[in-house]
Image (cartoon, rainbow, N blue to C red):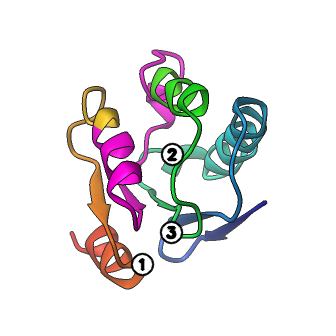
Amino acid sequence: MHSLRVDRERKLIDLRLKAMLSPEDAAWIGEELRAAVRDFGPEVGQHVTLYDASSIPVVPQATAELIINTFNNEAVRPLWARKVAFVVVTALARLQVQRLREVRPDIGIFGDREEAIAWLLEE
């Protein structure tokens, strides 16, 4: 359903979503992601995060709302990455990610994984 890889050298968290996510799935993946972020210790906030959703056309509306609410949660903000990029391949998925910009306007939205990683790693 997903894979989570942490590249400590580049301070890159790479979350690949491989199947449609229910709100429950997204909540569990979010907990796993936050645990990976906390492992950065004093470097939390210096990391970057890639959400690669190129394998799924769209997430259910309830899942999208949960993700928006999570990004908007004051308790989660101290764990925010320095930069966040989403890779999506459909117009509807792009619209869903654009809604996240209401909470975090600096989110990068890309159609290509390599382009997203390059943007995340540039200073």
Kindly identify the amino acid type of the residue bearing the numbered disc 1: Arg
Q: Marks 3 and 2, Cα distance to the nearest angstrom?
A: 26 Å
Which range is magenta?
71-98
| Between 66 and 123, the one nearer to me in the picture | 66
N-terminal label among 3 and 2: 2
- Mark 1 or mark 3: which is in front? 3
Kindly identify the amino acid type of the residue bearing the numbered disc 3: Ser
Q: Which residue is depicted at the point 51% across and 24% down?
A: 65
Q: Residue 49: x percent and y percent?
A: 47, 57
Secondary structure type for disc 1: helix
- The circle on residue 54 is 3
Kindly identify the amino acid type of the residue bearing the numbered disc 2: Val
Using a 10 Å C-alpha cutoff, classify the residue at mark 1 as few (fewer than 14 neighbours), some (14 to 19) or many (20 or more).
Answer: some
Horizontal arrangement in the rendering, residue 19 relative to residue 76 (left or right): right
- Mark 3 or mark 2: which is in front? 3
Note whether 33 is above or below 119 in the view shown: above
Quadrant for the N terminus in the image: bottom right
Q: Which residue is depicted at the point 30% across and 80% down?
A: 115
Q: Which residue is depicted at the point 42% across and 21% down?
A: 72
Horizontal arrangement in the rendering, residue 83 relative to residue 71 (left or right): left
Q: Residue 15: x percent and y percent?
A: 61, 61
- The circle on residue 66 is none
Task: Identify the residue under disc 1.
Answer: 113
| Between 48 and 113, the one nearer to me in the picture | 113
Secondary structure type for disc 2: loop
Using a 10 Å C-alpha cutoff, classify the residue at mark 2 as few (fewer than 14 neighbours), some (14 to 19) or many (20 or more).
Answer: some
- The circle on residue 44 is 2
